[in-house]
Amino acid sequence: ENAQLKDIISHAKEYGFVFPSSEIYDGLQAVYDYGQNGVELKNNLKMLWWKCMTQLHQNVVGIDAAIFMHPNTWKASGHVDSFNDPMIDNLDSKKRYRADVLIEEKAAEYEKQGDVEKAQSLLQEMGRLLGAEDLKGVQQLIISENIKCPISGTSNWTEVRQFNLMFSTQVGSVAEDSSTIYLRPETAQGIFVNFLNVQKSGRMKVPFGIAQIGKAFRNEIVARQFIFRMREFEQMEMQFFVRPGTEMEWYQHWRTMRRNWHEALGVPTEKLRFHDHEKLAHYANAAVDIEFEFPFGFKEVEGIHSRTDFDLTQHQNLSRKKQQYFDNDLNEDGKPFGNYVPYVVETSVGADRLFLMTLCNAYQEEEITEGENTKTRTFLKFHPAIAPVKAAVFPLVKKDGLPEKAMQIFNDLKFDFNMIYEERDAIGKRYTRQDLIGTPFCIAVDYETLENDTVTVRERDSREQKRMHISELRQYIGDAVSF
Ligand code: ATP
């Protein structure tokens, strides 16, 4: 793991954003807990996504489906048979790897050396072999590319095998009638099986969308890069049901919308890129990833997929329940479009990956000079809309009625914003602590406040302070934190 990622991981732990799960027992691989600031940031991200999807689109509504689903769901969706990753073991280090990830890393190495062509042909070859389920070929590719185990440094590899990523468990009180069910590996299927429930109960007209935020579980082989790849994570997915033949327009639409959303959150455009899939999943006719430049390179944050009518048709076949929509709009011949199984364009983003992107993007170290001294200031430059704490209120000193006055301001604003009241330590230290968790505003109460009800407001990014009347605070903070 590179140095910058290491800094971010330790910052996240030290300031209450992300802790390793069950840390007193040395943690559990690829599982993490969110701390007091992390949960605020994550909730803000989720709420923002939810509002942008449902509140801003009249034809997108939300649901919250259960994690457990009928086992046939996963037969129909293809997950039982083909939700696999190709794995390979190194005999010396006894470490397990994803064969495709090893090859991707090799391609990234070529790209770094400037050999883009070689990188691309390697990825294409891998795509071809995996598409043809030629696992022997994948192993050969790893050997011929002389890919070494990062731990042992040897190329003593086993054959490549498929590994199913779904976690399973048993339901039923007595052993005999128990049956295997799965923890959902994606939230999408909860939406597909409720398609008609929502369409009918909401009298929805195609095109319309269903959005959902919820946990998903994958028994990932490689658990690395912090919360980038977890075994328990959260997805925010939206399935948009469209008339067959119009899916490409909607695919383009959502691709643009979603990228703009990330940029509006403060991610610079040069840190984002589209990556069109060369190899398409069996259910898709177009797919693109929105990638962010993490400290470990450009990696997927969100996927936009045109999933055709694959899922609904599969569910229709296995459940023997029609999954059709009657479209009474008129076609070119003046006749209703009639019954069809809608096509689906989905947007799928991981809340945790979005969180990691936000944290990496916000993490700033700047040299500042104070008199003779230069020092490094670390701060988190979150968009105010997602900052865990919106404003902190400080009395300059702990006497002469300043704490009471500061407390009044705190109590007045706490109904609208997540606030902190802080009176310990020198004021400079208090500013530093707020910088470290990304609080956009610090409000200081001093002796002048007692005279004329004005305070200083220090802005996180510029460190500039301005004086304003207490009655202006709500509007000032409110404007900044709106999205
Ligand atoms: P990858 O290729 O990185 O494994 P994927 O293509 O399998 O991802 P999708 O199935 O398209 O991912 O899932 C949609 C989104 O869910 C991803 O863009 C990512 O943000 C998130 N996601 C998927 N797997 C994980 C995971 N193990 N941990 C955290 N987030 C994940």
Image (tube, rainbow, N blue to C red):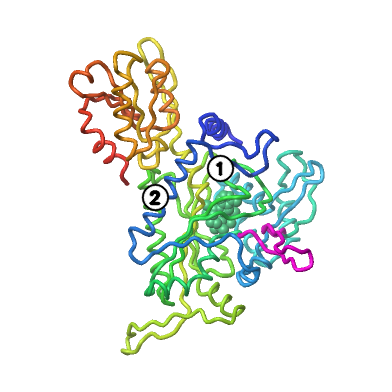
Of the four image quadrants, the one with ligand 1 is bottom right
**Which residue corresponds to the image point at 47% horizontal and 70% vertical from the top-left?**
344
Give the residue type that dot 2 points to. Leu
Residue lying farthest to the left in this orientation: 452
**Which residue corresponds to the image point at 41% horizontal and 27% vertical from the top-left?**
434
Q: Position of residue 407 (x, y in %)?
A: 33, 26
- Left/right placement of residue 44 relative to residue 226 reads left
Tell me the residue that label 1 is attached to: 112
Q: Quadrant of the N terminus?
A: top right
Q: Secondary structure at mark 1?
A: helix
- Left/right placement of residue 466 relative to residue 178 reads left
**Which residue corresponds to the image point at 60% horizontal and 44% vertical from the top-left?**
109
In three-dimensional space, the C-alpha distance between marks 2 and 1, rounded to whole angstroms, equals 36 Å
Count of numbered marks: 2
Residue lying farthest to the top in this orientation: 372
Instruction: Select label 2 or label 1 by which is in front.
Output: 2
Q: Residues within 10 Å of mark 1 (few under 14, many from 20)?
A: few
Q: Position of residue 298 (x, y in %)?
A: 52, 46
164 magenta-colored: yes
Residue 174, quarter of the rendered image: bottom right
Residue 185, quarter of the rendered image: bottom right
Tell me the residue that label 2 is attached to: 48
Q: Give the magenta part as a residue range.
A: 163-184
Front residue of 397/77: it is 397
